[in-house]
Amino acid sequence: MSVFASLVERLADLLQPLFGASAAAAAIVLFTALVRLLVHPLSRAAARGQKARTALQPRVAELRRKHAKDPQRLQRAVLELHAQEKVSPLSGCLPSLCQIPAFFLLYHLFSSSTIGGQANELLSHRLLAAPLGGRWADALGDGGVVGGAGVVYAVLFAVVAGVAAFSYRLTKRTMADRPVLPPAGDGEAVPGLGAVTKVMPFMSFFTLVTVAVVPLAAALYVVTSTTWSAVERAVLYR
């Protein structure tokens, strides 16, 4: 973790002339953008996979008609079709899974008072009036909603809510244009995917809870990554 702390510190030093006391916050945003650039090939592959699954829908519909009275055989047949065409029904999860280590690194980095036996100097950095190691509850206890730190969180919540609303509409439209499940009453062609599909449009709104409970540094990662995802999906799934 000390190596990661040094990376954040160096990025902050490079950005200090532009962002002053908020240079570490800017470094986290830049770090998040770099992570998303590295993951972007997986996002493009996920988009291609979604389009490939859409192209298979006529054949899936034929299988549904053929095995309408045997749901288990239908599931096996659809899974075999996806395997034959080398299309994974869950490939869209890979970009998110690959970002989990970076998020938890930031979470632990800004939740630890010491690094390598020494005081964690990163905890002294701020985004305007809000300490990067603080949480929303700390901001409410120090000035309340209209205090300096409270206003920073209010802006973050507003950004997350806007991005979540945009992502919700985008996901609903994408799922309507490119369905991956059979119509109601025909059974699930891909086991377990029905529950995921129902929850998927609301996933972005869960980010509000994450931003409220994690250290501000980790919240910045989440906000930046979520915004990137919304723009990326709008481009790749247009």
Image (cartoon, rainbow, N blue to C red):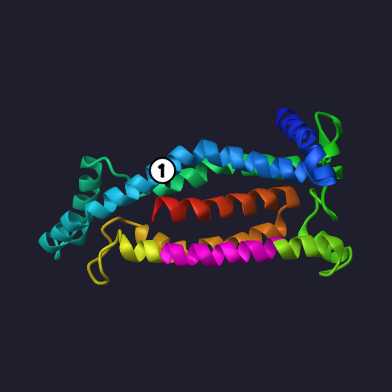
Q: Which residue shows up at 81% across the image and 38% down it? A: 17
Farthest residue, direction bottom = 185
Could you say where residue 238 lies in the image, as x and y percent from the top left?
A: 39, 56
Front-lying residue, 133 or 71: 133
Q: Which residue is mark 1?
A: 44
Tell me: residue 6, above or below residue 165. above
Which secondary structure type mostly characterizes the magenta part of the structure?
helix
Q: Position of residue 215 (x, y in %)?
A: 74, 51
Q: Which residues are magenta?
A: 156-172
Q: Residue at x 87, y 43 (%)?
A: 124
Considering depth in this image, is 98 or 176 the residue closer to the camera?
176
In the image, farthest residue toward the front: 18
Q: Which of the 4 image quadrants contains residue 196?
A: bottom left
Tell me the residue at 52%/52% (across/down). 229
Identify the residue at the far left of this view: 66
Q: Is residue 24 magenta?
A: no
Q: Is residue 215 visible?
A: no
Q: Count residues near mark 1 (Cα–Cα under 10 Å), then give few for <14, some for 14-19, many for 20+.
A: some
Q: Hey, what amino acid is under mark 1?
A: Arg
Q: Is residue 223 above or below residue 27?
A: below
Q: Is residue 129 above or below residue 108?
A: below
- Tell me if residue 219 can be seen: yes
What residue is drawn where x is 79% and y is 44%? 19
Expressed as whole percent of the image width and height from the top left, the position of residue 204 reads 54, 61
